[in-house]
Image (cartoon, rainbow, N blue to C red):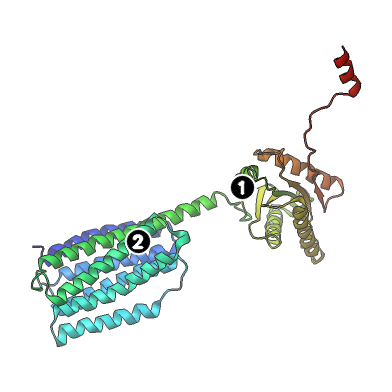
Amino acid sequence: MLSVPTLWTTCVANFCAMSLVWIYVARSYPKFEASRFWTAAALLATAGAVTSMLRGVGEFRLLVLSCSVLLMMACWSCLMGIQRFYNEPITWRLAVVIPGLTWIGIAFFLFVQDDMPMRIAIYSLGQSIPVAMTLHLLMTQREERNAGARLGVFCSVLILAVYFIRSACALLGIGGDLTIVDFNGLQAVLMLALVFLSMAWNFGFLLMAIDRLRNEVADLALLDDLTGVGNRRHLLQRVTEECARSVRSGEPFALLVIDLDGFKGINDTHGHAAGDACLQHFALMAQTRLRPGDMLARSGGDEFCIVLPSSTLREGAMIARRLLEVCRADAAECSGREIPIAVSIGVAQWTAEIGAYPDRLFVVADQALYEAKKRGRDGYAISEPAPALVPEIPDMPDMVRRKTA
């Protein structure tokens, strides 16, 4: 037979360990808001377990109420962490009303009518609501389903099942009598199961946090620090993927290479801070003229590239005209110390001759950009598709001579 103090000692040890883990995560990643709620949940659960261990020291009924409130708050903090993780609004009102009603029910069967099975049933119902809401959120966010979320779903289902079985057994008297100091054997096993399922539940949240943070770090490695658009590494990765896709499907895509005209003069005359501001401003303007799925990247210095999936030269030229129009309109509105931005654009299209080699496409696009600059800048040029390769046919007289020889 497991005693109540033994069970709560196990809870304290487990929740203390989880608290330390979440404190480390929250301090290491202060912008990761969900971790603060999960840290609070672990600390509240630890405090609730410690409070329950003091039953022989203080007023029993007050300690029971305090323990119940702390553990309910811990469960709702877990739900709030999930809500912030998925950028859902936090249900503050429910987080106050449902624990409050649960607390009133427990207090009634503690002070007015001492009934431990009813207290177990009311507490289990109150705890099942945030667990069920967590399960619903995890089930509906299919696009972000990872190993941690799947573990969270599995543990949520088991926790709900254990709460149901525990309530039913307590109300029906299955497993024997319940006392303040000792649970019956069945209740002890169910209580122990809840402890380890809660730990596994939190571990699922931790896996979700690790996966999210790893993805954010990977995204940062592919972004340009100054403009926030893709960097050269991301650009090469995307163009390589598009080339491979076009080789398989035969469907072309377009690439725009963009150069800010007179950028060196801007840096020399106005300083590098003004040059950086020009780059940032152009990136913002360009993004307003792109379609969903198009990718803007800074390939280095004052040069940008745009990848247009499933697009032809004609569609690439259309995007180039849009960019020139927005830059010219912005330049016309400049006054005082504002610096007008002008660009030259080279437009190229993937062809079968380019194949799976992105460097060939960049060469073609750079040639078109050079042509645009040669024409006077502030414009665009289109690369001419390479002629198809045909076998060389010898002259007719030579063929005749060979046959008669």
Task: Tell me the kind of residue under disc 2.
Answer: Gly
The quarter of the displayed image where residue 391 is located: top right
Question: Whole-percent x and y of residue 158?
Answer: 27, 64
At horizontal 75% and vertical 55% (from top left) the residue drawn is 315
SS for dot 2: helix
Q: Is residue 178 left or right of residue 236?
A: left
Query: Measured from the top left, where is residue 279 in percent x and y?
Result: 69, 55
SS under mark 1: helix
Residue 238 circle label: 1
Label pair 1/2, CB-CB below 8 angstroms: no
Residue at 14% from the left image edge and 78% from the top image edge: 116
Q: Is residue 9 above or below residue 369?
A: below
Q: Name which residue type carries label 1.
A: Arg
Task: State whether residue 31 is above or below residue 312.
Answer: below
The residue carrying pointer 2 sits among few (fewer than 14), some (14 to 19) or many (20 or more) residues within 10 Å by Cα, namely many
Name the spot of residue 373 as percent of width and height, x first. Answer: 83, 47
Percent x, y for residue 335? 80, 66
Q: Which mark is residue 152?
A: 2
- Residue 287, by quadrant, is bottom right
Q: CA distance from mark 1 to mark 2?
A: 34 Å
